[in-house]
Every structure is written in structure tokens, then in C-alpha cells.
Image: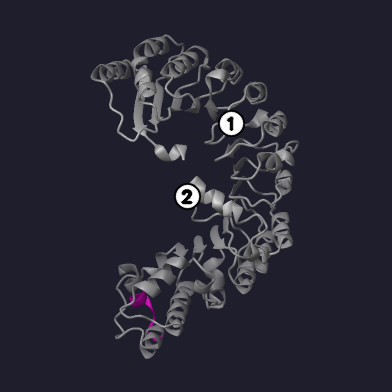
Amino acid sequence: MQNFETLITCLPKKSKAILYKNGIIISTSRPPLFNYIAFIKRLDINEINSAITRFTPKILDNNQILVTTQEIFKMLMNQTSLKILHFEFKSNDDIPNIPFTAYPGGKDCLSKLSEFSCSSNIYPEFFYQISRICHNLQSLKINFKSFISKGLTELISVQKDLKYLDLNYCEGYSDESDLDYCESNLDGSDLDYCDCKLDDESQLLANIPNTLNKLHIFGRPCHMQLSFISKLSNLQELSLSFLKTNGLKDFEILQYATLPKLQILTFEIKCAAVVYLINFLENNGKNLKKLDLGKKKFFDNSLNLAISNFCTNLTSLRFTYSYKTLDSLKLILNGCEQLESMDILSSVNCRGCQDFILLEMIVEFSPKKFHELKVDMGSCVDQVIAFQWGFEPIFKCWANRVPCIPLSLTINSKLESEITMEESNVKVIEEFIKLGVIKEIKIFNDISWFC
């Protein structure tokens, strides 16, 4: 409320008179001694819209809301030079059709914009206006709604140096059940979504410039084709969220693509099908620094072999292991000589000895630069306890490594109760920290990781 009141007090006299005349404010207060508006670099239009509708002293009708919004935008366009702009609304009814980019100072205000996030359903005139001004965006995030405005494609096509693109088809969905529901409603059968026309989406994707360094796609609908990624030869980071759809269809078209600068490949939830991922790694694995195979239980000896053969420069790896794949894990540890950290989800329930064997294997076979291990151990109390009692002999072996880089160890569990360390284990940890063998050990619950 205080921020909104500050905006009102900063309005010029003419704007305050308009608000007073329309019954929106009851007095025309003096402006503050300090010009706060000139220092605004980030603007979230949804926050302004919410502030107007929620925090005014009285309930405003639609015309009063429109008038207030216009006057605030006039002031902002005339007095600020924005770097970041967020233009997103919860529903179509919330979107005010205000040509604020045409207000005095609008061009100067937006000409240096570097980060822009928006809904796909904003009125086309806005996108056409901003396309004439903003040609040097570095970051663009699009939250797809019921349709795609025509001007959005033009905005993408005029960008000269776009580095980061985030395509979000499931805004507001946080857990997997919600995400599955979201994707089931974006499979081409949804009537509202069909109104956006699939060729509009294809044209939008076809106009993505080949300047991208980073691409993130979240909640991809079934009809979306990933073939456009093949042309992004400057891509360094690719993050894909495969949900309910079959990974075979998702990644098949990319399996033979060549992305010569790709360094980070992330599957946030479900990994692509093994046969296609292996082919992709054969073409692109040499330059990969980080590989994240997702949260789902996923393990395969043939994939481990491919990682050891094709991803020899990896520094970070996240994956799920099984006692059936422990032997092939040695191949990764031996083949990836630059490996520094691993984030591992255990698929073994109530087999703490298997996790102990995993730790032994990492101590014995991990490359010289390795120094960080995260293990997520499920919900079995015995498994977590057994793992703790193996600390001392493991740390002694780590102390004999040459060179001995202090180890950081994080243990997550899905236990509902808090994990407690035995006093003897705490003393062991403290001793090895003093000796410089261990950097830190964290043991905590992180249920969300398993969701």
C-alpha cells in the first residue's frame, strides 16, 4: 500500500487533478521531496494493476481503474528508463488496452530494455508498439495463455542479440500432478488453446534468432515440434521439462542435431528416451560440462557407457542410480576425468549398504578434481542411519587421496521426521573437518525433490 501511495504522491499536478475530478482521490497531496520515480529500473505492470484494484481507499469501477492506470503509465514513461519489464496478467479481463508505449517519453523509457516477460495473449497493438522500440532484448520469457497475439512473433523476429528465451506453457503449476493435468489440457484438444492456431506457434518458433545462449521450455504441449532447436548453433544451455508425453516423440527429432556450443543439458523432470539421448550425446557430449537427467527414477547401463565415452569433459552430473548399475557407474568415474560433482538419487529402499558401496566407489574411482556429492536417499530410516555409520572409514580413505580436495557431502531424505545425527558421528565429522579432509556435511529433508 505504501508503494502505491508513493506512486500517487509522485504524480504531476495535472494527473492528480484528473484523479480528483474522477473521484479516485480525495485530495491532491504535495509531491515528495525526493524523485523516486526517476530511479525505477524494474516495472511489473501486474503489480501496479493489483495495487490499483486492491489498495485504493475505495472500490473503483472499471473506468476509474483505467483512468488511474493511464496516469501512472504516463508518469512512468516520462520519467524512467527501464531495464526490466514484466507484463503479465491472471486473466484476459485484467489486461488494460492502454497504448502506454505511445505516451511522451515512451520510446526513451523502453529503448534500453534488456529483460522482458509477458503473457502471450496481450493485445496485439502492444506488441507492435514495443517491437518498434525494443530491438536489443537479452532475456525474454513468454507465459502461454489462451491464444498467441499476432504481434508477439514480430517482437521475436526484430531482436538482434537475444540470449535467453523461456517458453512456459504451465505457469502456476508447481507439483507433478498439476503439471500432468496442465499438459493433458494442452494436447491440441483444448478448444481455447486451438484458437491460437498451431501455425501461429510454429511461425513464432521459426522466428527465434540464432543468437540464443540459453533456452528453457517448460510444460511443452504435445503438438509442439522441437525441430527449431536444431538451428540454434550458438546454444550453450538447453533445459527441457518433459511431462506426461512420451520422451520418444520429444527427442527423436533432435537425436542427430549438432549444437557445437552446448555445455549444459537439463531434463527437469523426465529424461528423453535412452536410444535417442545416446545418439544426441554422441554428437554433442564432448562439449558438455553439466548433464542433468531429471528427478524421475531412471537408470540404464547403456546410457552410463555412453556418458563415459562421449561426455569426457563433464564437471557436473545428476542422475538416478540402482544397485544394478553400480558397475557401470565406475565407467563414468573413470571416463569423465573432469568430474567435480554429482547429484544422485538413490532408487534403493532400505539398503543402506548399497549407498555405502556407492560412497566407497566414489572415493576409490572418482577423478582427482571431484569434491562435491549430493545423495537423495528416499524414505527408509535404516538406509539413512546405515549410511551415517560408514562415515569414518570412508573419510580416512578420502584423506589418502592425492591431491586431497576437501569433500562437501549433502544427504537428503524423504523422511517426514527430522534426521538426527548420532553424537559419535558428529564427533567424527568435526574431526575430519578440522583435518581439512571434509569441507562440510549437510543432512536434511527435502521432500519436494522427490515430488
Residue 213 lies, with reference to residue 409, above or below; the image says below
Furthest residue toward left: 423
Q: Position of residue 145 (x, y in %)?
A: 58, 62
Of residues 84 and 197, the one drawn nearer to the viewer in this rendering: 197
Residue corresponding to mark 1: 289
Q: What amino acid is at disc 2?
A: Ser
Q: Nearer the viewer, mark 1 or mark 2?
A: 2
Answer whether residue 167 is visible to the viewer in this image. Answer: no
Of residues 450 and 329, the one drawn nearer to the viewer in this rendering: 450
At a point 59% along the width and 52% down the height, the residue shown is: 183
The span shown in magenta is 7-14
The reply, left or right, for residue 278 in relation to residue 353 is right
The reply, left or right, for residue 5 in relation to residue 92 is left
Determine which of the numbered discs, if any, sits on residue 71 in the image: none
Q: Position of residue 304 (x, y in %)?
A: 62, 23
Of residues 167 and 345, the one drawn nearer to the viewer in this rendering: 345
Mark 1 → mark 2, Cα distance in angstroms: 28 Å
Q: In the picture, which quadrant includes the N terminus?
A: bottom left
Q: Position of residue 398 (x, y in %)?
A: 42, 13
Dot 1 or dot 2, earlier in sequence: 2
Residue corresponding to mark 2: 174
Residue 288 lies, with reference to residue 246, above or below; the image says above
Q: What amino acid is at disc 1?
A: Lys
CB contact under 8 Å: marks 1 and 2: no
Question: Quick one: label 2, few (<14), some, or many (20+) residues within 10 Å?
Answer: few
Q: Position of residue 305 (x, y in %)?
A: 65, 21
At a point 40% along the width and 64% down the height, the residue shown is: 39
Whether 233 is among the magenta residues is: no
Magenta-colored segment: predominant secondary structure: helix
